[in-house]
Image: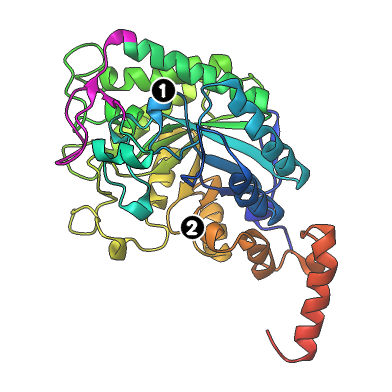
Amino acid sequence: MSMPLLFTPITLRSVTLPNRVALSPLCMYSAKDGLANGFHFSHLTAVARGRAGLIFTEATAVVPEGRITHGCCGLWNDAQIEAYRPIVDAIIGFGSVPAIQIAHAGRKASVQPPWKGSTPLRAEDAATGSPPWECFGPTAEPVGPGWHAPTAMTEAKIQETVQAFAAAAARAAKAGFRVLEIHGAHGYLIQAFLSPIANKRNDRYGGDLAGRMRFALEVTEAVRAAWPADLPLFFRISAVDGPAEGWSLDDSVVLAKELKARGVGVVDCSAGGVSGAPAFRANDSGQPLRTRAERPPGFQVPYAERVRRDGGVATMAVGVIIAGDQAEAILQEGRADLIAVGRELMYDPYWTLKAAESLGCDPGAKMWPDNYGWAIQRRAEIMAAAGRP
């Protein structure tokens, strides 16, 4: 049989991915002073050992105030380069490609980790070592009731932040990462500038679509200049805000064309987040999907399909992609070029290898690391002799 597309290599600039499976950027909230540590090594290299082609680190802050929580990783100093290097080397050693997403949380910064409710930090949290910090946004409007009121960014602060993204990109290259993604989704700083719900500025960084895109495009230009020309650049978008008055899929197509013109090779298509709670694609009645129960498998794939077709750029699909045959169908139908998997790879770091088995393209467990593969094949023989699947 021919090799499934999911396991067919793809070349982006000078980088060849061994397959089309990517570990989606997943925040672990486990760093100290922005430094990756043994937890991150274990988390990321387990997925590399499971043969995912592209391994993204979590959203990594370009400045301290750009963290979501105190436990978020950063790339605002050179010590953080050194913390990432052994992780990068190990990912490469397993045959995967190391990637990093750089980010600024904007007005959604300074919160508790999810297992503590993702609620804004308060003054009393300082007693437990988690003081709040100043947040920034396009205006002083908070995400919603009870959230921090951000400081509206001056043009000087905007330019300072653009340069922080560029500096983080340069550090990522020094750490050995081979793919870089700019986080422009989920209500964080860049997407807050893009969205008419969050961006009410009346200067050249607000107003019409061109004004609201200006910050995102300036960041992209600065990052592309700082990131090696032979290495690919991704950009994650929230393809829609959800509410009709928000950022639309048509806007995303326009943005994708502008990003491509500035050297972005892949647009990573997610959704929602600008108002705190997720708001996803519209259902048949035109209302946004807001609850987890309303999110069917592949619910965001139509975004990747539309941006790929009308934006003329490669896309990465994400969102409740749970099985190998589902991922393969998305690729075969030309709806996306890469498949990002998040929670499924947290649940099972060997999801990629099991997808290969289910698609019939790994006889003899040859895709497994050598020191696993022989034993996995022996296990299969024992299970078959015992009449077990």
In magenta stretch: residue 140? yes
Please tell me how crowded label 2 is: few (under 14), some (14-19), or many (20+) other residues with Cα within 10 Å.
Answer: some
Residue at image mark 2: 343
Instruction: First in sequence, mark 2 or 1: give its number.
Output: 1
Q: Residue at x 58, y 47 (%)?
A: 22
Instruction: Report the disc number at residue 332.
Output: none
Q: Nearer the viewer, residue 209 or 189?
A: 189
Asked whether residue 295 is in view, the answer is yes
Displayed quadrant of residue 93: top right
Coordinates of residue 302 in the picture (x, y in percent): 38, 50
Q: Nearer the viewer, residue 295 or 78?
A: 78
**Callout 1, which amino acid?**
Glu
Q: Indicate whether residue 295 is drawn in magenta.
A: no
Q: What residue is rendered at 71% in x and 57% in y?
A: 3
Amino acid residing under circle 2 = Arg
In this picture, residue 115 sits left or right of residue 356? left
Residue designated by label 1:
258
Give the image location of residue 206, x and y in percent: 22, 18
- The local secondary structure at tag 2 comes to helix
Name the residue nearer the viewer: 214 or 133.
133
Disc 1, SS: helix
